[in-house]
Image (cartoon, rainbow, N blue to C red):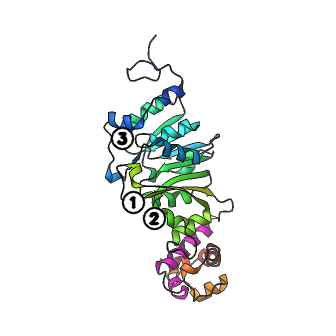
Amino acid sequence: MTCANRPTSKSGCADRRPPTEALAELRPQELARRYRITADKRLGQHFLFDPAILDRIAAAAGPFAEELVLEIGPGPGGLTLALLRHGARELLAVERDRRCLAALAELERAAAGRLRLLAADARRLEIETIAAGGRLVIVANLPFNIATALLLGWLHALAPVRRMVLMFQKEVALRLLAERGDPAYGRLSILTRRLCRVERLFDLPPGAFVPPPRVRATVLRLTPQPDRPPPDRLAALERVTRAAFGQRRKMLRSSLRALGTDPVALCRAAGIDAGRRAEDLSVAEFEALAAALTPASARPGGAARRSR
């Protein structure tokens, strides 16, 4: 009997073991050693190998039904393996570091059709295209240096997303969780909380990673809100929060001048005192400002044109 068209074992012969058994024998840390994969600082890599931590992340992302599970930056496959063991039926792992692809290929063979690899930069992915009309769950140990940019992109493409379980630098996670009155409260807090329900799951110390980063990490679960604003209202919310927090210590009558419209009239239309500051407004109040701005922004020659 030949080994053609079959998953291969370390010896090169066809691996006839059941997929669950083949997965159980894989050790991502051993794969990293065998393929000489070390973390690349330029890519913001900090690998996770602790099975207990990986199981907690995978469990938080489930339960899995028919959704496509999208993992960003799998590295040597620690979280990938945990997701497969927790029942992900269709897993797409997106990795730009080609050093990791050979190690991940062993996981792909052992997964018997449940895992696909995509060599790509996650910053250039189109979520709707990946979902192909279905639903998806996004799971990632995000590189700290591009985590915020990735999240902001996904917040504009939430239609196919059922939930996201993501790891951030703790400082960034606190900004996502912040409420009015918190020191970390700002534009990122408002946009994220308006679009998603944000849950803090657990923190991780630097020693949990290889190599250890200089900061702690936090795992969050983000579930899209069912009543998300339409694109024009979201664009207005982004403009208002950018202007207000661009000069967060100034009163709205001053900071909102950056919008190119009368800030006092805008605040009056939204039912908000123009003498207040950005850090004192709730998410709902910022949305009221966005609603007041939207009609003016839509008119030819209106605020949107004057703000260029």
Q: Which residue is the site of mark 2? A: 171
Contact? badges 2 and 1 (CB < 8 Å): yes
Q: Which mark is residue 215?
A: 1
Q: Position of residue 137 (x, y in %)?
A: 58, 47
259 displayed left or right of 8: right
Of helix, strand and loop, which one carries label 2?
helix
Question: Closer to the N terminus: mark 3 or mark 2?
Answer: 3
Q: Which region is colored magenta? A: 232-257
Q: Which residue is the site of mark 3? A: 98
Taking the magenta stretch, the answer to whether it contains residue 243 is yes
In front here: 129 or 213?
A: 213
- Between the C-alphas of marks 1 and 3, the distance is 27 Å
Q: Position of residue 250 (x, y in %)?
A: 49, 86
Residue ranking furthest to the top? 1
- Between the C-alphas of marks 3 and 2, the distance is 30 Å
Q: Which mark is residue 111?
A: none
Q: Quadrant of residue 58?
A: top right
Q: Position of residue 121 (x, y in %)?
A: 42, 49
Give the residue type at disc 3: Arg
Give the residue type at disc 1: Val
